[in-house]
Amino acid sequence: MRHKNSWATVTAVGLLLLAGCGESNYDIKRGIAEAYNETTDARLAAIDAAIADALDRPIVPEDGPDVEVTTDQPISGVVFAAKNNEPGGNARVLWLDAVETDYDSMLNEYVSFEQLTRWFIWPRMAVKYDSIAPGPPEDFEAAHQDLADTRYLLLVRTREIMPPKHQEENSYFPGAWVGQGHLYDLDTGSHLAVVLVGARNPPPVDFAGSTLDVSIVSDDPEHNVEQLTERLHKNILLFPTLFAAEHIDGVETPYELDQPPFGTARLKLKGQE
């Protein structure tokens, strides 16, 4: 169950009920944005401060420690949300490379980033550009509530990215990424820890028999590379939660690595078949 901002929630629910009374989706969502305005402004200001702080910190060298805890206070109760956009968690991930990009072009360059970070993008677009996201009011309200529920933020920063590429015939390098993650408490503005993180795509041997969850067109290498790139961007938002949970006490991730008897380990939600 979510812990909601009571005033904003009551107001937003009332606005949603207006959908049956002839109010347009745009008007309803504009009302939702206004109902969450105080909470949204506070959270976005805290995220902006965290981004500035993370960018000002040096890149951890390759031979540096796996983790460095930077707070004297115990870290506890940090729970990452599944798929980075579902309710139930109080921690989420942002990729600094995408955050630094101009927001209008970001949605084209980082398609998966928009999908998995609408809790950040939709409220921010409403505040910065007076832009209301498409879709039903329920999803728009959920994005604002997810932002309000996000107390902890893992900002991941690239140290090295090895993009997917076509090698020959049906052979592709699937892509990999290495970086560092800065964990923040948005309520206090405290930097809690920095941890080395990574992400990758499962290495397909041959797309003809691959179970990789991307749409593959055997005779279109450019399309396939785009699909692998999108999948890698998703993993950059999901894999780092594994590293944070492994190296920082008090941090939980909904993910685990599934290692079949034959084949490559894949990221999956805990309890998922």
Image (cartoon, rainbow, N blue to C red):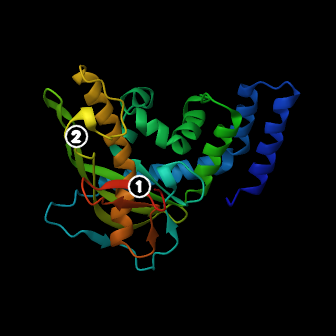
Q: Is residue 26 left or right of residue 124?
A: right
Residue found 40% across the figure and 26% down from its top: 108
Residue 170's quadrant in the figure?
top left
Residue 90, image x and y in percent?
55, 61
User: Foreground residue, 153 or 234?
Assistant: 234
Residue found 38% across the figure and 33% down from its top: 110
Q: Is residue 134 left or right of residue 153?
A: right
The secondary element bearing badge 2 is classed as: loop
Residue found 73% across the figure and 27% down from its top: 25
Q: For the residue marked with disc 1, what is the amino acid?
A: Lys
Q: Residue furthest right?
A: 21
Residue 236, image x and y in percent?
34, 48
Count of numbered labels shown in the rendering: 2
Label 1 crowd bin: few (<14), some (14–19), many (20+), radius 10 Å: some
Q: In the rendered view, would you say 76 is above or below 239?
A: below
Q: For the residue marked with disc 2, what is the amino acid?
A: Pro
User: Foreground residue, 134 or 175?
Assistant: 175
Q: In the rendered view, would you say 110 is above or below 200?
A: above
Give the labeled residue for mark 1: 268
Q: Do the residues bearing badges 1 and 2 touch, measured as CB atoms within 8 Å? A: no
Measured in 3D between alpha carbons, the distance from the residue under mark 1 to the one under mark 2, in whole angstroms, is 18 Å
Residue 187, image x and y in percent?
55, 63
Q: In the rendered view, would you say 208 is above or below 267?
A: above
Residue found 23% across the figure and 19% down from its top: 219
Q: Is residue 38 left or right of residue 91?
A: right
User: Foreground residue, 100 or 236?
Assistant: 236
Q: Disc number at residue 174? A: 2
Label 2 crowd bin: few (<14), some (14–19), many (20+), radius 10 Å: many
